[in-house]
Amino acid sequence: MYVAKMERENLPLERRLRQEILFARERVYRFGQPTPMERLFLPGNDPAPEIWVKREDLSPVKCYKWRGACNAITQLTLEQRTNGVVTASAGNHAQGVALAAKTLGIQARIYMPRSTPKVKQNAVLHHGGELVRIVLSGDSYDEAVLAAREDERSSGAFYVHAYDDLKVMGGQGTLADEVVLSGHGPFDAAFLQIGGGGMASAVSCWLKTYWPEIETVGVEGIGQASMKAALEAGKPVELHDLDIFCDGTAVRKAGELPFNVCRELIDRVVTITNAEVSAAIRMLWETLRCISEPSGAMGLAAVLKDRAALAGKKVLVVITGANIDFLQLGLIAQSAGSMNDASRTLRVHIPERTGATLALLDSCFEGMNIADFQYGLNSPDHACPVFTVTAENADKLAELPARLEAGGYQWEDLTGAVDVTFRAISLRGDLLSHPVFLRLDFYERSGALHDFLSRLIRDRASLCYFNYRQSGERIGRALIGLDFQSVGARAAFLQDLPEHGEGYRSCRPVDEATMARMTA
């Protein structure tokens, strides 16, 4: 047995990895069952690839990481089990270690960054029970690794690496074995997200064993492309800055073993933006009713980005996990990337006079959907409202600048601007005469907001404040500020204003304390 082990260690890395994947078949299914494959049909009539999704979000720990952790820990000696295990993880690998530790009766300490979402911490404790202790250390995965390695040196516990370990990589490769056995192949291409590279290296190794012609595409976030940097440098290198939106793949330096496999078996690496990931998360929800964490949707994001070129091909993507903080879902849903239609954010300069905003809406924004409207009075002469506009037809959206210029409007593109994202809407109270602020709940349909403004406000008051963002509900909600030339004009407007009316469910003034705070 010892000789056989030595012989295996002298084999080329790819052959050793194939053997480890083969042996992992005997071990991982003690801890969980194979996950399904599911066809994803893209909406629309444009040419599209045939997409098959490997649903690792339906695994015992809602991500693929259980495979590698369980395969590695199962192979520990009695002495190693007695000393316990230690690891560092941003969340998903930790759950796999916890599952294996509880099943095998092994003590485990898991170091996690202090910023780790509660959903992942709670999941670790759920799967590990009393045998697992979480230690929050540092503000990043790298700092948690340093603390866990120090624990390893001082305690003698066995360190279970999240990706740079052949046994861990072999366990991850069993998901590719299930793909081969599913009967849905062969595939023309597989889009595999990369963090440290353990999953992508093992899956590409196994898929190319059976389908040598398959194109394996590594997918990384544009702000966390450690494998791309390693391939360009010829060795793993450390990234200076790291985007953690896709926290499951936020690895500063690719693993040594995964790098050596990926440089031979990954055909190319593509990078994607956070907005493209958000769009993929929405697509997974709308097609499969699947809620993916950001890193889990990266493969699909790359396919959607290259949809036209992949038309007619059969492609594989892996939903690597669904361990997302509930609060993050709200941010993703409100992001520009998650919008179904094309969008653009513009600041338009208009004269500060009654009816100017309506004139702009009537002339330039006709047929378009206003998804976000931000404005506060800051000048007695001119106004600069900010609109995020969407359109089903991207060509119609592309015509908007020409419409504005034809109407004599100056404009600026503020798509992605920080102040717009954080809704920094300033308002000069000293410029107001007799203001009133209204909370408006209107039925969310095309043109409803315009109809309300046109019917009830036109020529009666100046718009001094507007805060509205589309939420996806059937009811849109906006906070509106109107300024009147006299107390009598304001009183007459409020007397005539029905609380309920055609096209809107409710319109009522805010309380005086709120109005005082806004105009101070």
Image (tube, rainbow, N blue to C red):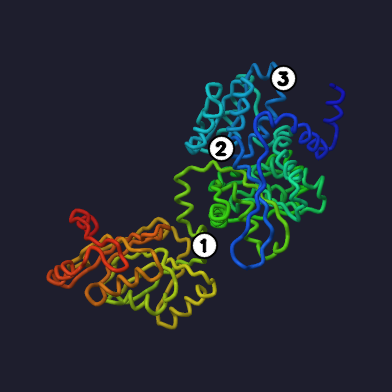
Dot placed on the residue nearer the N-terminal end, 3 or 1: 3
Amino acid under disc 2: Ala
Q: Is residue 207 above or below residue 483?
A: above
Given contact means CB atoms under 8 Å apart, are the residues at marks 1 and 2 in contact?
A: no
Query: How far apart in space, not on screen, are marks 2 and 3 (Cα)?
Result: 27 Å
The kind of residue on which mark 1 rests is Asn
Residue 490 appears left or right of 85: left
C-alpha distance separating marks 3 and 1: 53 Å
Residue ID for mark 3: 77
Instruction: Find residue 284 and report its horizontal and vertical position in percent.
Output: 57, 53
Residue in the image at 17% along x and 73% along y: 485
Query: How many residues crowd around disc 3 within 10 Å: few (fewer than 14), some, or many (20 or more)?
Result: few
Neighbourhood count class around disc 1 (C-alpha, 10 Å): few under 14, some 14–19, many 20 upward = few
Q: Position of residue 185 (x, y in %)?
A: 76, 51
Residue type at mark 3? Answer: Thr
Circle 2 is placed at which residue position?
90
Secondary structure of the residue carrying tag 2 is loop
Is residue 251 something one can see in this rendering?
no
The disc at residue 340 is 1
The answer to whether mark 3 and mark 1 are in CB contact below 8 A is no
Frontmost of labels 1 and 2 is 1
Q: Label 1: state its secondary structure.
A: loop
Position of residue 83 relative to residue 116, above or below, is above
